[in-house]
Amino acid sequence: MAEKNITLKDIVIDEEFRQLLPPLDAQTYSSLEQSILDYGCMNPLVLWNNTLIDGYNRYKILTEHGLPFNTMNLEFSSRNEVLIWIISTQVSRRNLTTMQLTYFRGLHYNTDKKLHGDAGRLVNNPSGHDVHLGGNTANRLSEQYSVTSRTIRRDGQIADMIDAIGRASPDAKRDILSGAARINRKQLRDLASSSDDDIEMISSEIVTGIFNDKIKAEVTDLTRTSVPGNNDKSDFHEFITFVINQLHEFINDVQSIPLNTDPIVLRKLIRTHMQKLEASYKQLN
């Protein structure tokens, strides 16, 4: 429903909702800004009870330039339903990093369980009749996101861990989701039993760059023990780093493949990663 007579000052910014939206890169943001300056803001800001739930980049540009705008108000019965709507909208709209997609799937799973439990639920379809959604939450979301139910549950654990780190340091959470922090999904799952003090320490290490330095040090140690006597280890060091990152990427890709996937798809995935490794290996002196 379109809304009138609302000003930018009336719009509420919710930090939890805002942090769900991956920031645009500088070039994309600049293009959006120029488009709005040239043609106006053609897409409305989406609100829930005057709280902005979609259009944060547009809101920022409109505020900076004092431009006219339209709004659309959506109705939800709870904050958790808003979270699920934002997640679904972002996943369908953007090219997300592997970690961002993992986080969104996990957050969707955790939020859905809070709303409806882990069993099937009744929903109201457009005809007005209640329809039962069979199966548990993980199974339903595995179909929606085309991954296994095991992946969905693991994503839920990872999302919980990322949120725990975010409570200690929002900057650390942002670095994880953007890829600035070189932490993988297994490392995040392994942190599940960490104490609050350990989580605060890791969050601080991520923000200050110490965490990335530790990863680099581990790679350096691996290089030194793997190629004793090598006079020029720089190329091999880069190769080892690439291999480690490639293995993490391969594991993440495999975990995201549904169990009933055609074997041809899996063979293509394996071949792609092997070709990347082969190309990097050939560059060694």
Image (tube, rainbow, N blue to C red):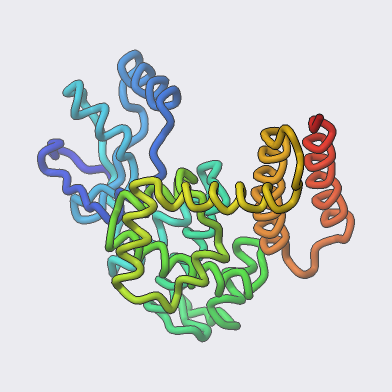
Where residue 116 appears, x then y in whole percent?
Answer: 42, 80
Q: Quadrant location of the C terminus?
A: top right
Where residue 88 appears, x then y in whole percent?
Answer: 47, 56
Which residue is rendered at x = 47% and y = 77% of the image? 129
Viewer can see residue 204: yes
Camera-side residue: 69 or 89? Answer: 89
Camera-side residue: 135 or 164? Answer: 164
Where residue 110 appears, x then y in whole percent?
Answer: 43, 73
Residue furthest out toward the front: 229
Query: To which quarter of the image does residue 9 belong?
Result: top left
194 left or right, relative to 98:
left
99 left or right, relative to 165:
right
Above/below status of 19 relative to 78: above
How many numbered marks, from 0 up?
Answer: 0
Camera-side residue: 80 or 219? Answer: 219
Viewer can see residue 126: no
Camera-side residue: 77 or 222? Answer: 222
Which residue is rendered at x = 46% and y = 76% of the image? 123
Where residue 238 appears, x then y in whole percent?
Answer: 67, 38
Which residue is rendered at x = 28% and y = 56% of the image? 169
Which residue is rendered at x = 71% and y = 47% of the image? 243
229 left or right, relative to 15:
right
Above/below status of 257 relative to 239: below
141 left or right, relative to 125:
right
Above/below status of 208 relative to 68: below
